[in-house]
Amino acid sequence: MTAVGIDAIEIWTGKLKLDLPNTFAPEKGEDPEKYTKGLGLNASSFPDAHEDIVTMGANAAHRLMDRKGLTPDDIGRIDVATESAFDNSKPVSTYIAGCLEQVYDGDFHHANKGERKFACVAGTQAIDDAYNWIKAGRNRGRSALVVATDTALYARGDPGEATQGAGAVAMLISEDPSVLELSTEQGYGSADETDFLKPNQQFPSVDGKRSMQVYLARMREAVEDFESVSGDTHPDDFEYIPFHTPFPGMVRKAGLLGYRHMIRDTTVEEELADEIGFQPREDEFEDREAYEEAIRDYMDKLKETDQYREWYGNTIDPTLSISREVGNWYTGSVHIARASALRHALNEGIDLTGKRLLVGSYGSGAQAEVHAETVQDGWKDEIEASNIDAQIEDRYDLSFEEYEKVHDRHNHDKTIEIEDFTVPDGEFVFTGRGRMNERMYDFVE
Ligand code: HMG
């Protein structure tokens, strides 16, 4: 069977930064530790005045194509995953292809283009579509370009304002991939939920606390569904477990639940029993409420054990380092979590070839998807080529007043002109609107 998976990854962060503990929290009259410790975030990325979902996606794709020496003829499909689209008809992938055609000989007329929507899980769904297209033998030797791009802005004053972010991840999905092979086995947890939605509005309607419960419930279903085809999971099976990361505090909760689930009926549960007892079993309780209380009690003890802390530190924490600095990128979030883990392994000299990841994607509304990935021997070269650390470092640090202007600038209901904070250099920029209200772009040398 042909191996199919991720052959290259490029990340483009919005070029502005909002410092959450030092700039945002004081204006809100909040303790900075709510951000650094509670939510687990240091900063959010924002798009500069000349940036949007098209420029960020096209810039990531351009870097990827240049680095891999690709031409438009090598790409048979361009899928964009976004929940920040500005057009209900013309997909963002056509704009991105148009940008790329400005800088490459040839064109993408032969490429199938589309747009995937299901909140944050759409990036993973677009990879899935590419995987199926290649497995079906319809790709004629070509690869698929998947771009997850979002400006994850919330209305001013919404509690979600603390978790904003903006950026894009471009991924090349190919046969015999050099970075990660995707498993055929998948699990889903999917239900009609109203936790976070944007009914023809730019900023989401959010029930924040409920959205966290729905995330955990759907993720649990997806893990169980995955196990029904792949067999039980065990904490030692996976080097890293990247989750969708709206903010690292959410993943802290998912990690603990996942660990409890994976150690059930294993020697790990037995080894821990002397210290914290066995996990409560539902049939030992008279009602659900008593059972749930016992579970909460067990989890409180579990999270303090050395075994759990070590596993979390090795398997989950390394997935959070980029997210801590950039916030929620919606469709791109799980993909920067994976990249964070690979970058951590590179920095620590860990040899990952042949090791497995378990990837947990999630989108509100709501759906979770879980699959496994096996690291291929080209992973190191790929991660070494990434300049994401420098991009994060080079962002312009906004004052609160500047942040307010930038938020207004990207608010579709306002027409605010502001000066750029950074100077475009070898990148696509937004230049204004055309006669049919289309957005227009140029490449700046
Ligand atoms: P909030 O009310 O601002 O924050 O809402 P909080 O008071 O709940 O505090 C957050 C955490 O900080 C809590 O931790 C506090 O205890 C802690 P927890 O108890 O939950 O572990 N805290 C502190 N810790 C240390 N020192 C302190 C301190 N103060 C507080 N001084 C909320 C937070 C996440 C609800 C809000 O930001 C929100 O609505 N966000 C948007 C929705 C969201 O991100 N949901 C996540 C799940 S849904 C999802 O992931 C999908 C999504 O990406 C969209 C999509 O799919 O398209 C959002």
Image (cartoon, rainbow, N blue to C red):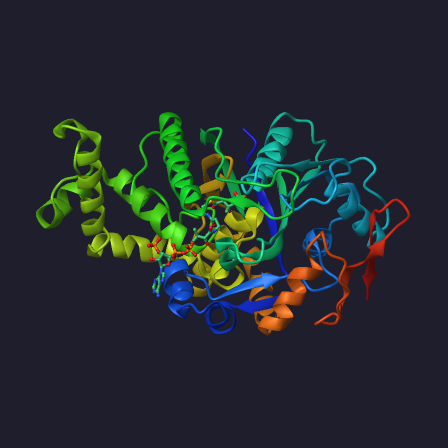
Q: Farthest right residue?
A: 435
Q: In this rendering, would 284 be left or right of 74?
A: left
- From where the camera sits, is residue 178 visible? no
Above or below, 348 against 128 in this view is: below
Q: Residue at point 61% right, 67% down? A: 403
- The location of residue 252, given as percent across then percent down, is 35, 52
Q: Residue at point 71% right, 61% down? A: 409
- The location of residue 192, given as percent across then percent down, is 49, 29
The quarter of the rendered structure image containing the C terminus is bottom right
Q: In which quarter of the image is residue 260?
A: top left
Q: Residue at point 46% right, 61% down? A: 321
The quarter of the rendered structure image containing the N terminus is top right
Q: Quadrant of residue 88?
A: top right
Q: In this rendering, would 194 be left or right of 46?
A: left
- The location of residue 25, given as percent across then percent down, is 47, 69
In front of the other: 292 or 182: 292
- From where the camera sits, is residue 116 visible? yes
In front of the other: 371 or 52: 52
Above or below, 68 against 30 in this view is: above
Q: Residue at point 41% right, 61% down? A: 40
In front of the other: 37 or 137: 37
Q: In this rendering, would 378 be left or right of 278?
A: right
- The location of residue 142, given as percent across then percent down, is 71, 37
In front of the other: 346 or 38: 38
Q: How many marks?
A: 0
